[in-house]
Amino acid sequence: MQPLITTREGQVRFRNGLIEHYGCFCFVTNSALAVEAAHVKPYRLERDNGLDNGVLLASDWHFLFDSHDWTIVVNDIQNQRFFRVVLGNRMLIEPRYHSYNNRYLGAENRSIFSQLSNEYGLNPDNFFEHNQNFRAKNPNIPL
């Protein structure tokens, strides 16, 4: 019998590395429940398990990120980098997600917030393709 979920090569090391670096919390909600490692640039394209290509997300946020129902927009403000959550149409109609629209990653957890923005944090270039796919699915939502 085949398992329903398969583990990608390096996935356990990728997740453990993100948890060791940031702690085991969803970057958006700060929840420690059902946290998964998500690739910003899809693994199938780049095979990139670098920490600068990964975010920890609660399982629903991971699924919705991969479905381009929300994205992360990089903002450089006064020589500091911020990663802003932008919700798409499907998530905007779901009340439990409203408060996260335009919130910055790590806003609920200052240690994550500062680590994301430093030189060892997320690579802003990795978000370009995700932003484009989000825009194609949600053309009415400004980034």
Image (tube, rainbow, N blue to C red):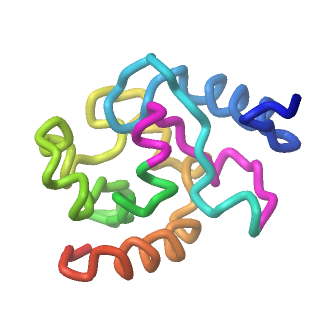
Horizontal relation, residue 94 to residue 69: left or right: left
Residue lying at the far top in this picture: please name it: 33
**The N terminus - image quarter:** top right
Name the residue rendered at 57%, 57% in the picture: 40
- Magenta residue check for 88: no
Numbered label tally: 0
Let me know if residue 113 appears in the view.
yes
Q: Which residue is more in the foreground, 22 or 8?
A: 8
Horizontal relation, residue 35 to residue 51: left or right: left
The quadrant in which residue 46 appears is bottom right
> In the rendering, at what x and y percent does residue 87 appear?
25, 57
Magenta segment: 46-63
Name the residue rendered at 64%, 33% in the picture: 18
> In the rendering, at what x and y percent does residue 62 appear?
49, 43
**The C terminus - image quarter:** bottom left
Horizontal relation, residue 106 to residue 52: left or right: left
Horizontal relation, residue 85 to residue 101: left or right: right
> In the rendering, at what x and y percent does residue 96 appear?
17, 35
Q: Which residue is more in the foreground, 30 or 121?
A: 30
- Magenta residue check for 52: yes
Name the residue rendered at 19%, 51% in the picture: 101
The quadrant in which residue 102 appears is bottom left
Q: Relative to 133, say whether 67 is above or below.
A: above
Let me know if residue 80 appears in the view.
no
> In the rendering, at what x and y percent does residue 42 appear?
66, 61
